[in-house]
Amino acid sequence: MVYATGTPPKADSGWGLEAALDIEWAHAMAPHAKIYLVEAASNSYADLLSAVNVASNYVAQAGGGEVSMSWGGSEFSFERFYDGYFTKTGVVYFAAAGDSAGTIWPSTSPNVVSAGGTTNSRDASGNLQAQLAWSSTGGGPSRYESRPSYQSAISQVVGNKRGTPDVAADADPNTGVWVYNVPDCNGWCIVGGTSVAAPVWSGIVNAAGRFSSSSQVELSTIYSNLGKAADFTDITQGSCGPHQGYVTGTGWDFCTGAGSAFGTKGE
């Protein structure tokens, strides 16, 4: 554990559960990874971005890796001026796409891999039948960020704005993940949200063993592999953003991006 300012922040049990979720599921996906928990002094953007800087430095000094961010807020007109926080050489940044309709920053940053949400359908025996879009996942075209070059292949879908999410993983609290946390859960409890998807994808990429030199390189790889079954499970059922009318379909979409990393035989 690292305190971004060098001193412990005020205790907050809600963030305690968030930290437990992120650590445990990054570890579940990448059990051999070295994990740093960097605690910000508060949930202000100034303090969160200061913590991102600290995390970036630790990861870069360790030889490269990923920074997972399970936080975000409404987009704002000058957000592009802060996108430079996610450009440390040797670091790939992941951010949750949000747990309600629409887009949030930093998920919309072109320098971040945006992680959206899915839900699971299981039979009476608990076997996974299918993955669908989680109806509450965040996603859509950014209000302020221009379409990056790596999304040129989906320009007919996203228009001239940066489209989110890029990838997806289970986020529905009804089909969520087990987390151990004594203060908030009194032991084990099930947790959901795209706060699951961000560390899950960070761990998956870490476990692959070949670290990209930047988020831009990682995202270019993701979009160059669109439609390849060996790389993604294309989510073709479900919808999200009820007022925007986003639906899934073959290929990239505003609910699940390029798709999930998990097949329909199990997770």
Image (cartoon, rainbow, N blue to C red):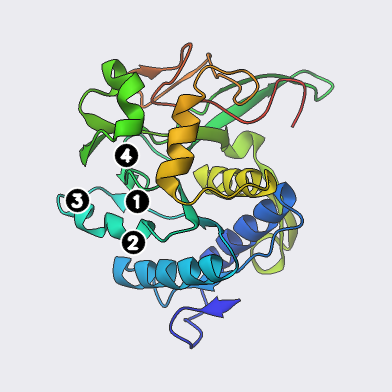
Q: Can you tell which mark lies on residue 106?
A: 1
- Which of the two discs, 1 and 2, sits closer to the camera? 2
What residue is pinned by disc 2?
Answer: 85
What residue is pinned by disc 4?
Answer: 103
Q: Residue furthest top?
A: 250
Residue 76 at what x, y percent from top left? Answer: 19, 51
Q: Secondary structure at mark 4?
A: loop
Residue 143 at what x, y percent from top left? Answer: 20, 38
What residue is pinned by disc 3?
Answer: 76
Q: Residue furthest left?
A: 77
Asked if 224 appears above or below 24 in the picture, the reply is above
Left or right: 102 in relation to 59: left
Viewport quadrant of the N terminus: bottom right
Amino acid of disc 3: Phe
In primary-sequence order, the first of circles 1 and 2 is 2
Amino acid of disc 4: Thr
In primary-sequence order, the first of circles 3 and 2 is 3
Q: Residues within 10 Å of mark 1 (few under 14, many from 20)?
A: many
